[in-house]
Amino acid sequence: MIEAERILLRHALSDPLNERFVFLLDSYIPLYNFPYTYDYIMSASTSFVDSFAETNEGRYNPKMDPVILVYNWRKGSQVKNRNLGSQMTVV
């Protein structure tokens, strides 16, 4: 999944006309209509990624230690909004 996101982001960065890149799941049910969501995303001055601490469901793999410590682990949503101007470090 991570590699797929990097590939999609790399392609988005190759088009200089792109201003934003948004990851959405096909099962995502929007709470607002498309025009509202579009205006909200395009007017945001920052990027955002949803994440929360969730270590009790076996998502944290002890093999990630010591690179990613259990208290630094976060479960992230696949829904992200990124300002493409600051994404070269992800790719």
Image (cartoon, rainbow, N blue to C red):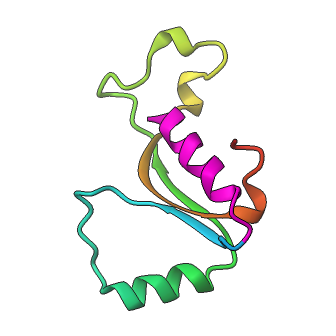
Q: Is residue 10 magenta?
A: yes
Q: Residue at x 31, y 84 (%)?
A: 32
Asked whether, in this view, residue 90 is left or right of residue 1, the answer is right
Q: Give the residues drawn in magenta, as a range.
A: 1-16
Q: Residue at x 29, y 28 (%)?
A: 57
- Image spot of residue 23 (x, y percent): 46, 58
- Image spot of residue 61 (x, y percent): 44, 16
Quarter-of-image position of residue 33: bottom left
Quarter-of-image position of residue 29: bottom left
Query: What is the total number of numbered labels drawn onto the structure image?
Result: 0
Quadrant showing the C terminus: top right
Q: Nearer the viewer, residue 26 or 51?
A: 26
Query: Image height check: is 39 above or below 73?
Result: below
- Image spot of residue 17 (x, y percent): 69, 74
Query: Image height check: is 6 above or below 11?
Result: above
Query: Image height check: is 62 above or below 23?
Result: above
- Image spot of residue 9 (x, y percent): 60, 51
Quadrant showing the N terminus: top left
Q: Residue at x 41, y 50 (%)?
A: 77
Report the residue that reaches farthest toward the front.
Answer: 15
Q: Nearer the viewer, residue 15 or 54?
A: 15
Report the residue that reaches farthest toward the top.
Answer: 63
Quarter-of-image position of residue 58: top left
Q: Residue at x 61, y 86 (%)?
A: 43
Tell me the chief SS of the magenta region: helix
